[in-house]
Amino acid sequence: MMSRRRLDSRSCPPGLFGEIQTPIRTEPLDSLFEMTSELGRGKFAVVKKCVEKATGKEFAAKFLRKRRRGRDCRAEIVHEMAVLEAARNNPRVVNLHAAFETDHDIVLLLEYAAGGEIFDHCVSDEPLSERQITRLIRQMLEGVHLLHQSSVVHLDLKPQNILLTSLCPLGDIKLVDFGLARRLGTMGELREILGTPEYVAPEILNYEPITTATDLWSVGVIAYMLVVGESPFLGEDKQETFLNVSQVSVDYCKEAFSQVSELAVDFIRQLLVKSPEDRPSAAECMTHPWLWQLGPDSDPPTPGPRGERSVGKWALPPENCEDKENFLDSPYGKRVRLEEGGGPAL
Ligand code: ADP
Ligand code: MG
C-alpha cells in the first residue's frame, strides 16, 4: 500500500519555494575545503566534517547524489536548499553557507553542529535530566513554531535530524534535513506518504491531509524518547510499527514511566493523539507547565511526585513563563522577533 500510494516527489515542484539565492558553484571543492571525518549518512546523502582552508572554519558538507534509482533528482536538492534559505532567520535551523556541484553530487556546506544528534541521548545509559530535556524541547518547539509561521512543515522530525551545537556543555538545538519539508496551503491539500514509520503521525499512514499538527506528533514521539529512553511505537517489523502508530498504542503505566514526572506524561499524552485537530500547536505547547516548571536557570530537578495532579490543559502558563505572544523572547535563548503571522518571506 505504501509504495502504490506514494506520490512521485516531482509532484511537489521546488518552485513552491521560489528561486534559490545561493549560487551552485562548480570550482573544485577540494581546493577550498579539506574533508575530514564522516558525520552521518542517509539513503542518498553522506555528511562529512570539513574545514574551509581560507578561514579554518568548520562546516558540515552534505553530499547529495544527483541521480537516484536512475532518475535525475537535482530538483529535490534545489528544493532542500530553498527551504534552508527560507528558514535563514530561524535560529534553530542549521545555516546554509554555500553549495557546490561535482560530477555526481550537489554538496551543501552547512553550519557544523558539533554536539551530534539528540538520538544519542535517547539511547544513552546516562539519560538527560528533565531540566535539560525541557530546555531542548523548548528550543525544538521554537524552531518548529517559526517554520509553521511560514507555513512550512518539516515532516521528518526525528532524533537523528535534531542536532546540538555542542555536547559538553550541552548546547543548543539545530534542526537539519529538510528533504521532505513542504509548504502548506499553496497547492491545495497536501497528502503524501513519507518519513520514517516509527516517527510519523497516523494521518500520514492513512493518507489523510498533512497539517502543521503532523510535526507536533513527531515532537511528542521525540519527547517520549528523551524521557523514557525508548521508541514508543517501534514494533518487530514495519507492519507492527504501522499498527502501533495507527492505534496510538502507548502504555503510560509501564515501568519505564515510574521515574517520569506527571507533567512530562501530560505533555506527551496531549501530543500523541490520533486526531490532528486535537493536538496543541507549537505555540500552545510552549505554554505547557512541564517546560517551565523548573525555570530556565533553576537547579537540577528532583523527580516529580507520581501522585502530583496533572494540569490536563495548556491554557495557563506558569508565572515564570513569558506571555504567549512573546514566548520566543524567553530567557533561555536568543531573542527572536516575530511579526504577526510573519516569519521570513519565502
Ligand atoms: P539524510 O537526508 O540522508 O537523512 P541528514 O541531513 O539528516 O541526511 O544528515 C545525515 C546525518 O548527518 C544527520 O543525522 C547527522 O548525524 C549528520 N549531520 C547532518 N547535518 C549536520 C550538520 N550540519 N552538522 C553535524 N552533523 C550533521
Ligand atoms: Mg536525516
Image (tube, grey):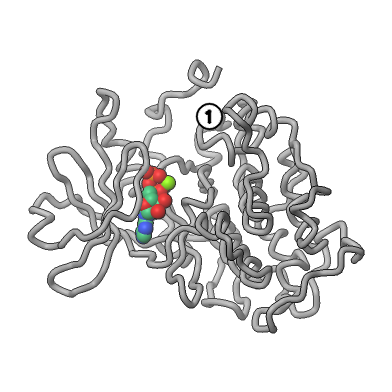
Mark 1 residue crowding within 10 angstroms, few (<14) / some (14–19) / many (20+): many
Expressed as whole percent of the image width and height from the top left, the position of residue 243 reads 68, 27
Residue 325 lies, with reference to residue 17, above or below; the image says below
Query: Looking at the image, which is closer to me, 235 or 318?
Result: 235
Q: Residue at x 61, y 30 (%)?
A: 236
Query: Looking at the image, which is closer to me, 62 or 211?
Result: 62
Query: Looking at the image, which is closer to me, 110 or 343?
Result: 110
Q: Residue at x 87, y 62 (%)?
A: 311
Query: Looking at the image, which is closer to me, 174 or 213?
Result: 174
Q: SS at mark 1?
A: loop
Residue 325 lies, with reference to residue 274, above or below; the image says below
Residue 202 appears in the figure? yes
Expressed as whole percent of the image width and height from the top left, the position of residue 98 reads 24, 58
Picture quadrant of residue 29: bottom left
Expressed as whole percent of the image width and height from the top left, the position of residue 11 reads 42, 27
Q: Residue at x 71, y 59 (%)?
A: 285
Residue type at the position of mark 1 = Glu
Expressed as whole percent of the image width and height from the top left, the position of residue 306 reads 87, 63
Instruction: Determine if the C-beta at disc 1 is less than 8 A from ligand 1.
Output: no
Residue 208 appears in the figure? no
Q: Residue at x 38, y 33 (%)?
A: 13
Name the residue carrying label 1.
192
Q: Quadrant of the N terminus?
A: top right
Residue 170 lies, with reference to residue 278, above or below; the image says below
Left or right: 212 as drawn, with respect to 26: right
Picture quadrant of residue 60: bottom left
The outermost residue toward the front is 125
Left or right: 252 as drawn, with respect to 141: right
Residue 154 lies, with reference to residue 336, above or below; the image says above
